[in-house]
Each structure stands twice: as C-alpha cells, then as structure tokens.
Amino acid sequence: MFIAHISKENTPDNPECLCRELDLRKIVDERQKALPVEYKGVRLDCGYRLDVVVGDKLIVELKAVESLLPIHKAQLLTYLKLTGIKIGLIINFNVSALKDGVQRISN
C-alpha cells in the first residue's frame, strides 16, 4: 500500500504527499476541492473542502488524531451524499500501524 510511504517519509496529514504518490502512479486526483451546496436555488460556499478526490470515484479524508470519532465518519458521509460519490476513506496517520488507521465508508 503506497500510503505507508507517506506515513513514514512525510508530514503525517499532508494531502500533497498523498497526491504526489497518486501522480507518480498516473492516478487522477484533486486536492482541497471546494464543495459548494445548493439550497433553494442558491449556490452556497459552506466552507466544505474535500482533502483528496480520486478520479471522481473516491473521497479521501486525511486525519492525524488520537482516535477517529463519529464526527469524522459523519463528515465523510456528508461529503459522499453531497457529491454522489459512493466510497470514501478516512486515513488517520496517528497510529502505529497504518492499516489500523484506514476506515472505508460507503454511502
């Protein structure tokens, strides 16, 4: 898993490092993608920012926290619903084994 390189070599929660790894593998991504919300015909910028969107198929939210909380899952679920993307990952780099910090969420 190429994400392991990031946790060992770079700033733990830096989306740019993940995006560089994706770029090296020729995988299309967008970072810090703004997510406006449309409400009653008006487009609102609510300040939502998606850490990384991979090929319009996957949202990746990067964290460096003591433990993942329900609010982190709720945040990703909100993003999935608003974008129509079906699958997301929360990656917490603040763990001893990276596999313990990856949580898959589907909408």
Image (cartoon, rainbow, N blue to C red):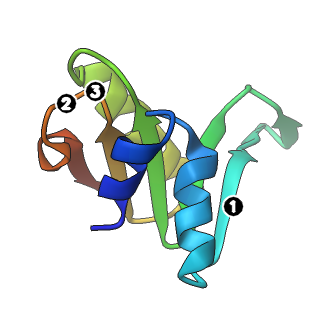
Label 1 and label 2: CA atoms lie apart by: 25 Å
Kind of residue at disc 1 = Glu
Q: Mark 1 or mark 2: which comes first in sequence?
A: 1
Numbered disc 2: secondary structure: loop
Work out which residue is located at the far bottom of the displayed protein and give it: 26
Residue toward you, 97 or 37? 97
Work out which residue is located at the far right of the displayed protein and give it: 42
Label 2 and label 3: CA atoms lie apart by: 4 Å
Numbered disc 1: secondary structure: strand
The answer to whether the residues at label 3 and label 1 have Cβ atoms under 8 Å apart is no
Q: Which residue is mark 1?
A: 30
Q: Residues within 10 Å of mark 1 (few under 14, many from 20)?
A: some
Residue toward you, 41 or 61? 61
Q: Which residue is mark 2?
A: 95
The percent coordinates of residue 63 (x first, y second) are 40, 30
Residue toward you, 58 or 64? 64
Kind of residue at disc 3 = Asn
The percent coordinates of residue 104 (x first, y second) are 23, 54
Q: Which residue is mark 3?
A: 94
The answer to whether the residues at label 2 and label 3 have Cβ atoms under 8 Å apart is yes
Quarter location, residue 101:
top left
Quarter location, residue 26:
bottom right
Residue drawn at 81 percent across, 31 percent down: 45
Residue 56 visible? The answer is: no
Residue drawn at 66 percent across, 32 percent down: 48
Q: Is residue 87 above or below residue 39?
A: below
Residue drawn at 45 percent across, 52 percent down: 60
Q: Is residue 42 above or below residue 46?
A: below
